[in-house]
Amino acid sequence: MMNSEARVADPKDWIKGATGDWEIVIGMEVHAQVLSKSKLFSGASAEFGGEPNDHVSFVDAAMPGMLPVINEYCVAQAVRTGVGLKAKINRRSVFDRKNYFYPDLPQGYQISQYKQPIVGEGTVTIDLEGGRQVDVGIERLHLEQDAGKSLHDQHPDMSFVDLNRSGVALMEIVSKPDMRSADEAKAYVSKLRQIMRYLGTCDGNMEQGSLRADINVSVRRPGAGFGTRCEIKNVNSIRFMGQAIEYEARRQIDVLEEGGTIDQETRLFDARKGETRSMRSKEEAHDYRYFPDPDLLPLDLEESWIAEIERDIPELPDAKKARLMQAYGLSAYDAGVLVAERASAEFFESVARGRDGKLAANWLINELFGRLNKEGKAIEESPVSAGQLGEIIDLIQAGTISGKMGKDVFEIVWAEGGSPAAVVEARGMKQMTDTGAIEAAVDAIIAANPDKVAQVKAKPTMLGWFVGQVMKSTGGKANPQSVNDILKIKLGI
Ligand code: ADP
Ligand code: MG
């Protein structure tokens, strides 16, 4: 991979300042909550929600003398994620205490990993508009505990603490400063989220805070050395990330162009005002007095245990996309839409197997996804199953129904269920393929409209009107192509 500093932004992403062009440099620290039933060092539930302090063990509340016990499943989840990021899995890692005071941190320190994280360098390939791809370097992934939450809005003159989150396992994924625009940063978080959802290691639910990012932003003259960065803390929506980066880059450019300097600091994004503001000057690692946690042994992983995890890694989005393009002749765009979620790719393949892949993709993308979206349903909740959709496509391909009627059948099956073939049979929706019957319908329309017949010779675009009339008189059952052909012959055009 290219040296981070050497990567220059696409000139279309340069920002015009009063004194010339600038580019944005972005590195992210993403906090992803590990998908696990219990916490990193205790058996308390890691489930979201619950009454305040319902999911708290003595360890999470930091009662004196309580000892942490590592949750093997959380370790496996971190390794799985590391494999998904094509990263180096470290056979030995160490848990350190990161010391700081906060009312929602009863231990007085967070157990994290510092010098020896569980996962080392890796790569995430991001997908940008126009099919452009960029590799973003991963610096490391480490495991750490989440903190609790102070509640300031429950009582006029008291604050409370809710320790349900205290001790929940987080993966902190640190990127290299390889991103050069808000769009690249947004694509990076989306891709990370997608990979972790495929792996089942983080649910990616940003509203519930399962995925949030600290965004480091600096600006420089295109291709120059890196500038001083500011860190925007805890942004939990992809849209806000884009807004925060654009605001922050503009602010830094204005300061620099007026002859000022950037102070390395921690900032907050105010979504209501769409701006970032200073929170505190940047803390340094030595402020935390990191040292190995004496309650925990170094984590030594066996090669065979890692290999077992690697064997069980599912097909990931990039590989799936390439395979769908190859196996079903799909465009990069269509394949990209279908692999956005693992479940939709799987639904697609059960429909497409043994059928026309392009047709199946069109049905999913244009009909099914649109319909699901409208009702706020996930693909797992689709009232039309893959089997039913496949049957509708078969009926169209066999010429039993037209494509348009296929959509009507889809609607009926969506609302009432049942076998598409039975719906077509019961409602007499079969397409009229008997040319004799179509001819009769055409003759009737021609006979009833001598004035239009006279006009159509001079104005062939009127043919559409005739097609419409025949379709209407046959209740939409005539094959539109046959109607067209027969009309042309009979009208002599
Ligand atoms: P800290 O914990 O002090 O924030 P880390 O090294 O863990 O430091 O994380 C630094 C983050 O800042 C990384 O994501 C890195 O890519 C990013 N970064 C480093 N230098 C720059 C820079 N000049 N501009 C933007 N981001 C940067
Ligand atoms: Mg940081």
Image (cartoon, rainbow, N blue to C red):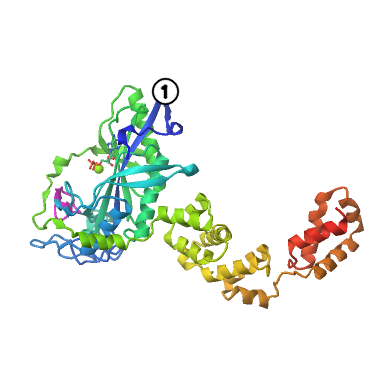
Any part of residue 333 in sight: yes
Residue at 46%, 60% in the rendered image: 345
- Residue 474 drawn at (x, y percent): 78, 68
Any part of residue 203 in sight: no
Specify the quadrant of the image occupied by residue 450: bottom right
Residue at 36%, 51% in the rendered image: 192
Q: In this view, does 294 lie to the left or right of 61?
A: left
- Residue 159 drawn at (x, y percent): 23, 54
Viewer-proximal residue among 285 and 266: 285
In what element is the residue under mark 1?
Answer: loop
Crowd tier of the residue under label 1, counting other residues whose Cα lies within 10 Å: few below 14, some 14–19, many 20 or above: few
Q: In this view, does 437 lie above or below 95?
A: below
Q: Which amino acid does label 1 sit on?
A: Ala
Q: What residue is disc 1 on?
A: 18
Viewer-proximal residue among 2 and 340: 2
Q: Is residue 100 left or right of residue 410?
A: left
The magenta segment: 97-111
Q: In this view, does 132 lie above or below 296?
A: above
Specify the quadrant of the image occupied by residue 273: top left
